[in-house]
Amino acid sequence: MKASRRDFLKKTTKGTAAVMLGSMLPGISAASYARILGANDRIRVGMMGVNSRGLALANNYSRQQNCEVVSVSDVDTRAAAKCIDSVFKITQKKPNNVPDFRKALENKNMDALVVAAPDHWHAPAAILAAKAGKHVYLEKPCSHNPHEGELLVKVADKYKTVIQMGNQRRSWPNVEAAIREVHGGTIGRAYFAKGWYTNNRESIGRGKEIAVPAWLNYDLWQGPAPRRALKDNLIHYNWHWFWNWGTGEALNNGTHMIDLMRWGLGVDYPSRVTSAGGRYRYSDDWETPDTQVITLEFPNNTSMTWEGRSCNGRTVEGNSVGVIFYGEKGSLVIDGNAYTIYDLDNKVVKEVKNQVIIDPRNLMNPAESLDALHIQNFFEGIRKGSKLNADILGGYQSTLLCQLGNISLRSGNALHIDTSNGHILNDAAAQQYWKREYEKGWEPTL
């Protein structure tokens, strides 16, 4: 990025707060507002990975008054075309189609890269972006393994780039209020937290090797991962359940809840980690556990558990996903952007519902408006050096807790942890999972 533009982005403060819940000028559409703003008033982003979550992010970024989506990168030509068309409908301006995101990073006028590719690409892509002088909005989890997470923290410091992890709940108003209640002693000292995720996913069956379709650059899709033959039950979602590319439900959905529990309990690295579970529901190609419980103990006399059930959707506390904190005087349940406080007799003391005021002129739904708060916090970090709600160090720490749970499960061992840095102590069997093998020539480096 040119020095003058970088300085401008850090110094300018134009109206970002008003964007957060949609304060579009009366009668002004997203497209016409984008034309009103000068080119240098907008943060220019490139999108990497736009099949599902990435498409939603591309739409959200396109609706931000102080942003321009300048490029779309995806190994699937169909997904790229769909995303480009979607952005055009919002802004009346087509972003460039740059299939290889590494080429997109060569654009000196691009300020940031949004990474929503599969997990095995998260850290390597963010590292390449930082080296190219770009800021990064990185979907969870921040890394495929702990070694990559540590690299990310070092990279952010070395190249002085802003890296925000997509733990969007850190920016949701009522979630922030709930954590303040916990920290403020509303339920007394919080000493235990429980998080969960439940679903009723179907079997992925036994895959058959297939020829790579014309619409897919499978070599680039695999990227840093050791090469495996393409099977018909892998792309686009089931890669989550294969260790070569994915990280299981613990990092797919558990990262969000474990991050909230870590935030509420005020902890960083655990002292002990155990995990139990397995692939129980079906006999198929799915490698990661469909049922898992992770228990983490911390040196401040607190602990947490996370329960994941991918193939049985029975809810906990009436919700498929959530967190509950237990304290000396009561408990607090977080459900989306809402929370409820109970006393020790299970009576409701306080209930805060999800009430987001939406301006229909910005065409956002409530979920998009909430996530826009996180995006704007990212922009403020770029423009003014404001504190990030989910900086890469915190993102790494929350991701690491999930990874340690998986390592405990895969090694079959209870892990004893150095509470100063999160490293595994005296366990060669577990330590082998700290870092992965890479396809030759694709290794991420500092």
Image: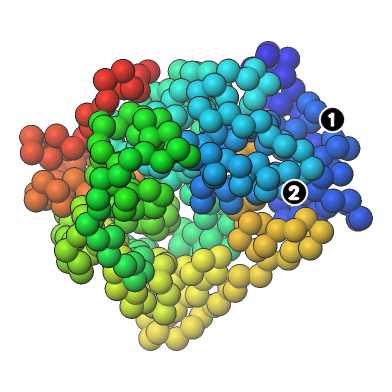
Q: Residues within 10 Å of mark 1 (few under 14, many from 20)?
A: few
Asked whether, in this view, residue 247 is left or right of residue 76, the answer is: left
The image quadrant that residue 8 belongs to is top right
Q: Residue at x 73, y 15 (%)?
A: 4
Q: Residue at x 38, y 48 (%)?
A: 235
Amino acid type shown at disc 1:
Gly
Earlier in the chain: of badge 1 and badge 2, it is 1
| Residue 244 seen | yes
Q: Residues within 10 Å of mark 2 (few under 14, many from 20)?
A: some
Image mark for residue 305? none
User: For mark 1, what is the residue?
Assistant: 38
In the rendered image, residue 195, in percent from the top left (x then y), is placed at: 35, 64
Number of numbered discs: 2
In the rendered image, residue 305, in percent from the top left (x then y), is placed at: 27, 61
Q: Residue furthest top?
A: 3
Q: Residue at x 36, y 30 (%)?
A: 219
In the rendered image, residue 375, in percent from the top left (x then y), is placed at: 62, 44
- Quadrant of the image containing the N terminus: top right
| Residue 123 seen | no
Above or below, comparing residue 376 to residue 9 in the picture: below
Amino acid type shown at disc 2:
Lys
Label 2 secondary element: helix
The one nearer the camera, 219 or 181, is: 219
Q: Residue at x 42, y 75 (%)?
A: 319
User: For mark 2, what is the residue?
Assistant: 89
Marks 1 and 2, Cα distance to the nearest angstrom? 20 Å
Q: What colouring does the structure picture have? A: rainbow
In the rendered image, residue 392, in percent from the top left (x then y), is placed at: 45, 36
Q: Which tag is nearer the camera, tag 1 or tag 2?
A: 2
- Quadrant of the image containing the C terminus: top left
The image quadrant that residue 98 belongs to is top right
Label 1 secondary element: loop
